[in-house]
């Protein structure tokens, strides 16, 4: 009887300040790859350009070293010493202060490292951390037209909860809210 070997070079850990540049790069690459059909071209160019990349790096460094609350966290997926993806979570804004409800604020895997389980590991680690914090529900917003992310979340046990919002990005861009029990 053979067993699948354990890969010690793959995992998830809390983000460190030194990871901020890699997180910003992954965010920019994943947005360019995944949102090119979902966002207006001018908006996408603005949020993924060189100036934005620098701003994102600074924001992620601040989020890692001085989060807005003790319940805000950033996790990174790593493989062979490289950051391959990240997830950020915090208290859910839509929960009216209910500490049992958290929000997945970001989940991105580098387009060069998709389909390797990094997103699933990040989602699982996020759920583990939040359960340890006493959370029972996790929410997130996804672009209505993002069938890849929505399909991934639904396959992981998430479901739309009926809430939607429209972002003004020079044109209306609709998002739907999904939730899962932890």
Image (cartoon, rainbow, N blue to C red):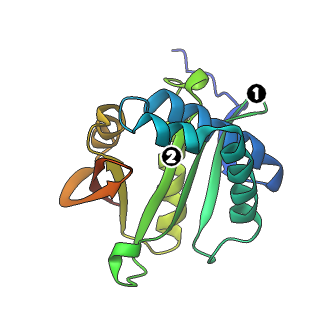
Mark 2 or mark 1, which has the lower sequence index? Answer: 1
The structure residue drawn at horizontal position 76% and vertical position 27%, both measured from the top left corner, is: 80
In the image, 132 versus 17, the foreground residue is: 17
Counting from the top left corner in percent of width and height, residue 15 is at: 72, 53
Residue at (52%, 73%) from the top-left corner? 133
Residue wearing tag 2: 107
Q: Write the residue at 27% across / 37% down.
A: 145
**Location of the C terminus (image quadrant):** bottom left
Task: Tell me the crowding category of disc 1: few under 14, some 14 to 19, or many 20 or more residues within 10 angstroms, Cα based.
Answer: few
- Whole-angstrom CA distance, mark 2 to mark 1, is 20 Å
Residue 132, position as x, y percentages in the image? 52, 69
- Name above or below for residue 96 compared with residue 180: below
Label placed on residue 175:
none
For the question of whether residue 18 can be seen, the reply is yes
Which of 157 and 35 lies nearest the eye of the viewer?
Answer: 35
The residue at 64%/28% (across/down) is 6
Helix, strand or loop under label 2? strand
Report which quarter residue 103 is drawn in. bottom left
Left or right: where 126 falls relative to 17: left
Task: Compare residues 51 and 177 and report the one nearer the observer.
Answer: 51
Q: Which residue is mark 1?
A: 80
Pinpoint residue 167: horizontal percent, then vertical percent. Answer: 34, 56
Which residue is the extreme one toward the bottom? 97
Residue most extreme to the left: 162
Above or below, comparing residue 181 to residue 120 in the picture:
below
Closer to the eye: label 2 or 1: 2
The residue positioned farthest toward the right in the image shown: 18
Count of labels in the image = 2
Q: Secondary structure at mark 1?
A: loop
């Amino acid at each position: 009887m053979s067993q699948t070997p354990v890969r010690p070079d793959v995992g998830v850990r809390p983000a460190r300040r030194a990871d901020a540049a890699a997180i910003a790069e992954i965010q920019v690459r994943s947005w360019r790859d995944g949102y090119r059909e979902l966002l207006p071209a001018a908006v996408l160019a603005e949020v993924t350009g060189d100036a934005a990349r620098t701003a994102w790096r600074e924001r992620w460094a601040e989020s890692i070293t001085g989060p807005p609350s003790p319940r805000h966290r950033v996790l990174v997926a790593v493989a062979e010493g490289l950051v391959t993806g990240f997830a950020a979570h915090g208290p859910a804004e839509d929960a009216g202060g209910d500490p049992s409800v958290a929000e997945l604020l970001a989940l991105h895997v580098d387009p060069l490292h998709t389909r390797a389980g990094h997103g699933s590991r990040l989602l699982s680690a996020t759920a583990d951390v939040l359960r340890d914090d006493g959370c029972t529900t996790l929410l997130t917003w996804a672009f209505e037209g993002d069938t890849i992310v929505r399909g991934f979340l639904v396959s992981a046990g998430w479901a739309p909860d009926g809430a939607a919002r429209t972002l003004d990005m020079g044109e209306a861009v609709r998002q739907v809210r999904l939730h899962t029990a932890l």
